[in-house]
Image (spheres, rainbow, N blue to C red):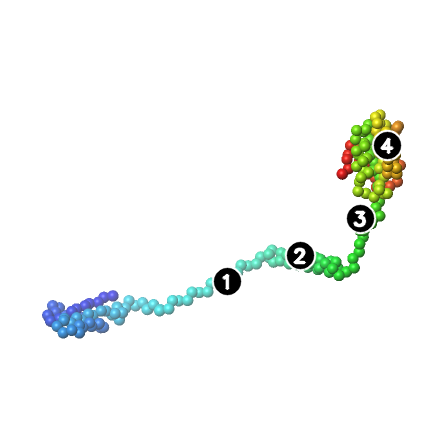
Amino acid sequence: MRGEAFARGSLAPETAPKPLPKSAKLAAAEPGRTAMEVAITTADTLEGDGRPEPALRPRPWPKPAPLTEPVHEGARAIVPPLTVMLLLIVGLVIFYAVRHYLFTLNRLFGRQRHPYLDIDIADWPTLTVLVAAHNEEAVIAGSLTCLLHADYPADRLTIMPVNDRSCDRTREIIDDFVQRYPGRIIPFHRTGGKPGKAAALKDASAAVASDIIVVFDADYLHR
């Protein structure tokens, strides 16, 4: 911007300024003060350079193009299998949920079967305990005593000590228990045949007719 200013007072100005198109005049209200007139150029005094005046409002930004990428054929081909797998998973979850709800309702309100009877009144199977013994005079008495105190119906339990050609007091101790507990202990004294524990148990098993056979060693103490 270009402008000129001049002051008028009681003294004559040295040079006469050029008048300006528009001016602002400031005058003192009190007398005796020098009146001053200041001319300020405004936008009207600007020399035009041929350019169009800028718009007061900014130009609107163009809307960006949507960020869409072309869908490949491979991506389109995998959508149906994934959809089928998702439907199968949802179907399985719903099936198991309904199944468990039905089981719960049947348990709460349906008639229940009792395939397993109470162990106190059940028909216990017959049980025979084979006790392999070869020169076991030091431990055979303790093993037979523990088996006699087993928590099993006495009328369904048979204890059969298998004396395999013992040379010590094993046979004597077994016969003593047989006399004290008649019907509870049935001895099997083996004096010949193939030697060994397996052969002795095989021969003893042939004389057993119970439902279940259990094998213990003579040094095993049943708790």
- Residues 219 and 39: in front is 219
Q: Residues within 10 Å of mark 3 (few under 14, many from 20)?
A: few
Residue under numbered circle 1 = 66
Q: Residues within 10 Å of mark 4 (few under 14, many from 20)?
A: few
- With 115 as the anchor, is 49 left or right in this view? left
Q: Residues within 10 Å of mark 2 (few under 14, many from 20)?
A: few
Q: At numbered mark 2, what does the secondary structure look like: helix, strand or loop?
A: helix
Image location of residue 192, percent across then percent down: 88, 28
Q: Earlier in the sequence, mark 3 or mark 1?
A: 1
Q: How many marks?
A: 4
- How far apart, in angstroms, are the residues tagged by discs 2 and 1? 35 Å
The quarter of the displayed image where residue 149 is located: top right
- How far apart, in angstroms, are the residues tagged by discs 3 and 1? 77 Å
Q: At numbered mark 4, what does the secondary structure look like: helix, strand or loop?
A: helix
Residue under numbered circle 3 = 119
Image height check: is 54 above or below 185?
below
Image location of residue 197, percent across then percent down: 82, 31
Check disc 3 and give the amino acid type. Answer: Ile
Residue under numbered circle 4 = 176
- How far apart, in angstroms, are the residues tagged by discs 1 and 4? 103 Å
Between tags 2 and 1, which lies in front?
A: 2
